[in-house]
Amino acid sequence: MLTDYHIHSNFSLDCKSSISEIVLACREKGITSFIITDHYEVSTKDVWKDWVFNVDEYKKQMEKYSLPVGIELGWDGIAPINIDLEIFDYVLLSHHDLDEPVTKESYVKYLERLNKLIRKIDHFHCLAHLDFPRRYNKDYEPFSKDTYDLIKEILKYLIEEGKFLEVNTRSISMFGEPNPSVEILKLYRELGGEMITLGSDAHYIENIGLGIQQGLEMIKSVGFRYMMVFNNGWEAVELK
């Protein structure tokens, strides 16, 4: 079973794909369960200040195609969250603020912010691309040994609160591993974590489902027995 729970449409500033194009692409690629998760950035920075996200129209479009209503909430942990998150079937929490260039020190700072902000927000289902800064380090260094304690704290909190962990497959084509890395996934599993989703983070039609099959094989090899699937509600489906 192929799922993709991280896809962007033209409701995001950085994507031009229409909902109808995404629906068709998923059908053609054999992706049986998917959720469009467009960007909603809540930040003290001005990157998205001129972008208007029409929530009502967004919901209408999802209803038109009988799709769950998802969103990727990008939050800096500071700005007030100005949207009702309970109207969404899937809230994918992310943190996109990076101190560049990405170094071991800036990666630690990123994780410190992430560790704090996940504790400030109640309503989210899943944490996106945990080791996100790795994408922007010139050597794609995982830094997992240097940040072990912080990553462990974040994973333990997700498990305790019943939140999912996203396996973001976009980076498999970049450096052969998802976000988070296989080592982090192993740690999550060792801590008792089982609630994972798969997402391609596609911003272009051709990238929908990219890396999903490889990601599926990776999580099975690490020892995961289930993945979270949306079927008029979230359920754990056994991996076969």
Image: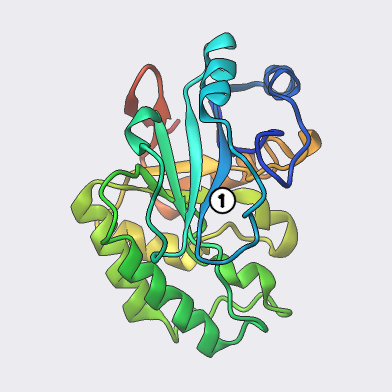
Q: Is residue 115 above or below residue 139?
A: above
Query: Who's the residue at 78% across and 36% down the image?
Result: 16
Pick whichever, 98 or 187, lies toward us. 98
The answer to whether residue 224 of the structure is visible from this angle is no
Q: Position of residue 189 (x, y in %)?
A: 33, 57
- Specify the amino acid type for callout 1: Asn
- Looking at the image, residue 7 sits to the left or right of residue 187; the answer is right
Q: Which residue lies furthest to the bottom in this view?
A: 105
Q: Position of residue 82 (x, y in %)?
A: 40, 46
Does dot 1 land on a helix, a strand or a loop?
Answer: strand
Way the structure is coloured = rainbow
Q: According to the image, label 1 marks what residue? A: 168
Query: Who's the residue at 37% across and 17% down the image?
Result: 232
- Looking at the image, residue 202 sits to the left or right of residue 63; the answer is right
Pick whichever, 34 or 10, lies toward us. 10
For the C terminus, the quadrant is top left
- Looking at the image, residue 120 sits to the left or right of residue 87; the answer is left
Q: Is residue 175 above or below residue 210?
A: below
